[in-house]
């Protein structure tokens, strides 16, 4: 059985995003734990890490379904086939990439640079990209769209906590 490159590349991207998120959050953990007043709704580090891992797994599965659906529909890994350009597919793949960068950027803004308000604004854009991905995927693969739902819900919860942190500090 031959393993398709997307089964390595897509999870690897998710792992790299998670590693950067972990590194940046560790860099600011003393500040976060010792200097910020946090709302009671903030979960423990362990529970938050478990949820983040689950969210990344679900988003990775969604990306794999999205890529494989395109692969099955065209029978090739080529985005351009017979001079057809699947603009929606390209846009969704681009949004997955932008989303990964925004995920890293949020951790950098919040934990390393201590720019809580800017991190909240950036997270709003992150949430918007997830919503757009979900809506674009809905017609092509309801399963891929629904696999993004935990990510959407978790980011909404983190946004709420970030807003509370802004108000408390």
Image (tube, rainbow, N blue to C red):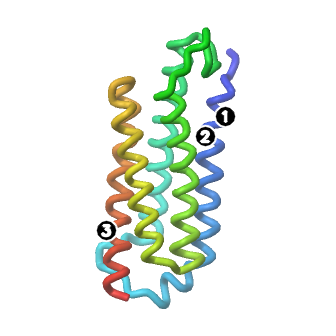
Is residue 17 found left or right of 60 in the rendered image?
A: right
Q: Nearer the viewer, residue 156 or 32?
A: 156
Is residue 137 found left or right of 82 in the rendered image?
A: left
Dot 3 crowding, Cα within 10 Å, few <14, some 14–19, many 20+: some
For mark 1, what is the residue? 8
Q: Which is closer to the viewer, label 3 or label 2? A: 3
Dot 1 crowding, Cα within 10 Å, few <14, some 14–19, many 20+: few
The residue shown at (50%, 53%) is: 53
Query: Residue 23 in the image: x percent, y percent?
Result: 64, 67
Badge 1 vs badge 3, beta-carbon distance below 8 Å: no
Q: Tell me which label, 1 or 3, sits earlier in the chain.
A: 1
Query: Residue 163 in the image: x percent, y percent?
Result: 33, 74
For mark 2, what is the residue? 11
Q: Check disc 3 and report its element: helix, strand or loop.
A: helix
The residue shown at (62%, 18%) is: 80
Q: Tell me which label, 3 or 2, sits earlier in the chain.
A: 2
Query: Residue 118 in the image: x percent, y percent?
Result: 46, 72
Badge 2 vs badge 1, beta-carbon distance below 8 Å: yes
């Amino acid at each position: 059985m031959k393993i398709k490159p997307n089964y390595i590349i897509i999870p690897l991207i998710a792992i790299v995003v998670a590693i950067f998120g972990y590194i940046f959050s560790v860099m600011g953990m003393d500040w976060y734990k010792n200097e910020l007043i946090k709302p009671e709704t903030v979960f423990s580090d362990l529970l938050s890490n478990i949820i983040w891992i689950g969210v990344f797994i679900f988003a990775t599965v969604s990306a794999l379904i999205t890529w494989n659906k395109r692969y099955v529909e065209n029978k090739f890994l080529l985005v351009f086939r017979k001079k057809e350009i699947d603009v929606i597919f390209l846009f969704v793949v681009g949004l997955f990439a932008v989303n990964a960068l925004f995920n890293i950027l949020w951790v950098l803004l919040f934990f390393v640079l201590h720019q809580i308000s800017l991190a909240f604004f950036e997270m709003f854009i992150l949430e918007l990209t997830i919503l757009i991905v979900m809506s674009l995927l809905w017609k092509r693969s309801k399963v891929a769209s629904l696999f993004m739902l935990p990510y959407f819900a978790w980011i909404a919860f983190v946004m709420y906590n970030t807003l509370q942190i802004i108000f408390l500090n």
